Amino acid sequence: MLDDFCDKLIDQRLEERKEGLKMNENGRMDMLDVFLNYRSERKDDELEQFSRDMFIIGTDTSSSTVEWGMTEILRKPEIYKKIVSELDQRIDSSKKLTLQN
């Protein structure tokens, strides 16, 4: 499943590069672009392994950061109470909470 995801990501980026879209929406190259620039010197399996590693590394650090933050909040009741208080002040309890509000 992860291999399929990485393959799709690489194929999509290669197609974008064929169409002349060489940079991301910020006008910068990302790690995959840099690696693709050196692709002619690499084997496809190295590119696949690189993209898989980058995905796993990014996912692991994000989940670790969230876990650390939640642990700190739960260990410090005064911070937890402050967060709950601020949320109560800003969120209308009669409405469903969504990403937009």
Image: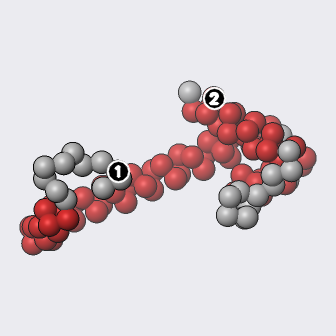
Is the C terminus in the top left, top right, bottom left or bottom right quadrant? bottom left
* Residue at 45% over, 56% down: 61
Quadrant position of residue 13: top right
| x, y percent for residue 9 | 68, 39
**Can you say whether 47 is above or below 34 in the image?**
above
Q: Amino acid at mark 1?
A: Leu
| x, y percent for residue 64 | 37, 55
**Can you say whether 28 is above or below 21 in the image?**
below
| x, y percent for residue 100 | 35, 53
| Front in this rendered view, residue 95 or 17 | 95
Q: Residues within 10 Å of mark 1 (few under 14, many from 20)?
A: few
Q: What residue would you read off at disc 1?
A: 99
Q: What residue would you read off at disc 2?
A: 4
Is the N terminus in the top left, top right, bottom left or bottom right quadrant? top right
First reached walking from the N terminus: tag 1 or tag 2: 2
**Left or right: where 91 falls relative to 69:** left
* Residue at 24% over, 49% down: 97
Mark 1 in CB contact with mark 2 (< 8 angstroms): no
**Residue 20 visible, this angle:** yes
**Residue 39 visible, this angle:** no
